[in-house]
Image (spheres, helix red, strand yellow):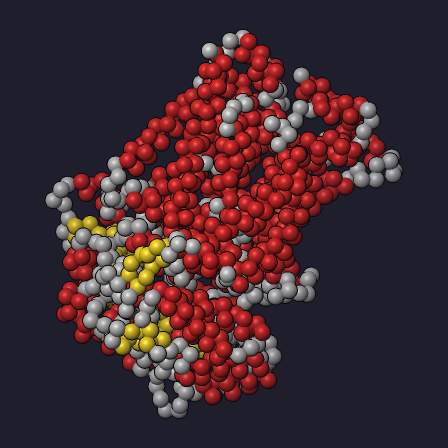
Amino acid sequence: MRAHRLGAALAVALTAALAACGSGEPAPRSTEAAQSPASAAAQGPVKLTYWTWAPNMDKIVAVWNQAHPDIQVTVSKQAGGDDAAAKYLTAAKAGNPPDLVQAEYQHLPSFIAADAVADLKAETAAIQGEFSEGLWRLVTLGTEGVYGVPQDSGPMMLFYRKDLFDKYGIEVPKTWQEYADAARAVRRKDPGVHLGTFSSKDPGAFTGLAQQAGAQWWSISGESWKVNIADEATRKVADYWGGLVKEGAIDDMPYFTPEWNKALNDGKLLTWPSAVWAPGVLSTNAPKAKGKWAAAPLPQWNAGESFSGFWGGSSTAVSAKTPSKAAAARFATWLNTDPAALELLVKEAAIYPAATKAQSALGEAPEYFADQPDFWQQAAAVSAGARGFTFGPNVGVTYNAFKDAFDKAVQNKSSFSAAVQAMQDATVADMRKSGFQIAQ
Amino acid sequence: MAGLTTAPAAARRRRGGRRARGAAGHRPWGVAPTALLLLGAVYCLFPVCWVLLAATKSPSELFSTPTLSFGTGFLSNVEQLFAYRDGVFWLWAGNTLLYAGGGALLSTAVSAVSGYALAKYRFPGRDAIFTVLIGGILVPAVVLAIPQYLLFSKFGLADTYWAVLLPQILHPYSIYLARVYAAAAVPDSLLEAARIDGAGEGRLMARVALPLMTPGMVTIFLFQFVAIWNNFLLPFIMLGDDGKFPLTVGLYTLLAAGANQPALYNLILTGAFLSIVPLIALFLTMQRYWRTDLSSGAVK
Amino acid sequence: MSHSRRNAWPYLFLTPAMVLFTLFLAVPIGYTVYLAMRRTRVSGLGLGKGARREVFVGLDNFAAALGDAELWHGWLRVLGYGALVLTVMLGLALLFALLLDSARVRLARFSRIAIFLPYAVPGVAATLLWGFLYLPSLSPLRDVLDVDLLGASTVTYSMANVAVWGGTGFNMLALYTTLRAIPRDLYEAARLDGASELQIALRVKIPILTPAIILTTVFSIIATIQVFTEPTTLRPLTNTISSTWSPLMKVYRDAFVTGDLYSAAATSIVIAAISLVLSLGFLRVVRDRAFEEG
């Protein structure tokens, strides 16, 4: 009897599934599917779904929802990083994407190429001036279209242990040459300590360092892409770090591993060339070293210059399939340019805002850097010197090639510029395979 | 019947064994089986103990105190985890329970009925059906997830509870196990006798076969429950709304917090530890079914 | 009359499984085959509407998967890893199942739950957890073992250990439950003849278990060929594991990292085919014993 009832229950479940299949209608839009039953009213407000991984975004959105009863946004908090991009692309392909999505700058071109994000040129014409030219370029790729509203940015700086620099008698390096000398000096003074480490797992960091040296990996000329990953600037950066790793002057442990956390806590690593968001990471991963870290501009390739690059940062993009593009663009604009929203983004989501005037409005230094009251002024200065960059339509391939090639190079202590060449070859081969037009 | 004679006999032998161990050299490997098993148990428990220890550490202790020591942050970790985004952890736990409980129940029913049919009937196409069903295991879940998602989307079922529940009901390994259990535990003679008494086939299965298969079904339920509880990829791809996430995907959003956000290791470890606890409880509850004497159902 | 009606019953019992199979396996597999024969073609910059379309390319993707040297290296790595995992894991599972089933073991319930417990730990968590234990500066094992457990020469063993740790309990329980399903009086006779527990295990239990052992082995072979979680989770911690270490990792990379769903589909069909050949080969070797319960 029992089995009979189970069988019946199963039959009901399957019939329901089949009935749903049989109806054969193309997918109801995710916006409708994901909504609360309250939305049944025909003339109700516009409902938007928003995929993001920024912390506390629901609190910020609540402020918007309060003020805009006609456009209600629902936050769905996702995992961040490369998986988030893959998931969004899959959802877009399936015809099931959210209306709004947080898109990292390097993934935006893939989204555009997959026709997954809408062109907001008309809707954003008024706000272009709120952002620096370099950041704006990241959401236009230098084309006529505008594919997102810049949200946060990550100009790179050098973070260092002030107390240990004093202990070992090291000056803050102003050039990469001085950084290399300091690395060797540290090894002589204490073989248990390294000045820094090269991570073969973080293509974003390497890309930022290459940007600082003036690399332009992708560019658009007419109807063709130019791919120039193994350019002179990039090879210079690669060989510099390769030499330091090979002679043992710096370590080769990847960032963000438990081991790296421990090294930071124990004072075994004295510097981290990172981005302006580093205080958040350091305060969570190395709470013991609070107040002992300081920030300085990145070392330069030529004395007297003041260049930087970007590591990280993201934009708010609107799905190409959304039926409420105008409403979504209004929300994206508000979120990233409205003074009240920006203040919340900084306070609640702990981001470094992309909007220029919000950057200069930042007051108190992060708690972790309490000893450095001019932290945000420094950041703004660095940000002004960050070089623009265009990402290509298959950054996933390039970044994956970075990890594989640099893993091998670090392990075998082989040439880093050969690894850069491997990135170039993999990227071009993939673009050729798909049919992208490539200019020589 | 067998049970009645076995239990005292085993007890007698056990006492005998213990005495024999006292008599030097009679059975030199007398303690060896127990020792071997305990060795295995220690090997298996060691990393689990590590999670327990790690879950007690506050963020500042996690990477700075010796690995094998207790921390002081367990309660505050738990508090933080429960408070995280207005207690979304409980929502994830409830979803997980729904997916794992519902899925495992349906899966056990389907597997048991199929296994019984495959083991106890001879009919044209039996081997072909068995091979086809079992062959499903050849296709990796990673591969199936995307086409399943694209198809579910076509029919408007993506990002629903069904999208996670339905694909996990059919489990080739469980059907295979059910077939083996049915073959071993359900004597043909018993079925024939019941048929002569005029029992219908459906009744035969429900009243005679399934009770005999209980230990096997418990195992299948347990396997499926744990498998669905721990599944990550399918819900990760199928679900967009974080209110429908199971624990694995939810905790993953803490780990992959975003490029410029630190992973919340202490909450993840505490969450991982807490998500194992119900499984241990389930296992302890299910244990007793393996002790039930197998033929008791038939004797009654 | 009644006979023919009885003939319909097994089909009825199998209907739910077949319906589920069709909906959630056969159709998606068919769709995968369809995807494997297609590819996107972009024109010009590939940006904007209409710049990208899907085209039929026949068997090109399969040819690429079969001609990919990196994939064959992956197969070799997995073969070595699999041989290690299969022998150790199944050996231990059989040993523990027999020990648990023998009457003379104490603390059996404790051991049973302890050995099964790792199965309750999600694969990703298990690998992370062992990863913490492998990392030189964090590992308490490092005081005992003076080797880099994530080095080029040791990383395969370290990964195999994770798989053995996580899988032994599951297989042990599958075998143990099968043992429990065997009527006890079968070995009573042997006992009365004065056979020792060891002799009963070798001469009575293992022969009865053989079909279960064989199929457990087949399933483990398939699972090993599909090894994915362990290397993927350990990869961020070491530079000795590439993104194509195992064939399934390449599938994942193509589908999720580089966005080439079509190559991923083709490669996965190749993986399924090779799994099929290997498991059929194994079954052929031991065929006579596999289904003797029929």
Residue C112, picture quadrant: top right
Using the image as rendered, state which of residue B140 and residue C182 is in the foreground: B140
On the rendered image, what quadrant is the N terminus of chain A found in?
top left
Give the position of the C terminus of chain A as an image quadrant.
bottom left
Residue extending farthest to the top is B197
- Position above or below: A255 against A247: above
Q: Is residue C77 visible?
A: yes
Q: Looking at the picture, does residue B46 appear above or below residue C137?
A: above
- Residue A273's x, y, as percent? 43, 76
User: In percent of the image, x 43 and y 40: which residue is there?
Assistant: C25
* Residue drawn at point x = 33 percent, y = 70 percent: A392
x, y percent for residue B101: 44, 35
Task: Choose between B43 and A18: the one closer to the eye.
Answer: A18
Instruction: Say whether residue A223 is left or right of residue B145.
Output: left
Whole-percent x, y for residue C13 in the image:
46, 25
**Which residue does the image show at 43% across and 36% down from the upper left?**
C21
- B197 above or below C129? above
Image label count: 0
Rendering coords of residue A62 (x, y %): 23, 54
Q: Is residue A155 visible?
A: no
* Residue closest to the far front: C58
- Lateral position of residue A56 relative to residue A145, left or right: right
**Residue A90 placement, left or right of A175:** left
Residue located farthest toward the left when viewing the structure as drawn? A43
Relative depth, front residue between C67 and A415:
C67
Name the one closer to the observer, A169 or A9.
Answer: A9
In the image, what residue occupies the spot 42% across and 74% down?
A424
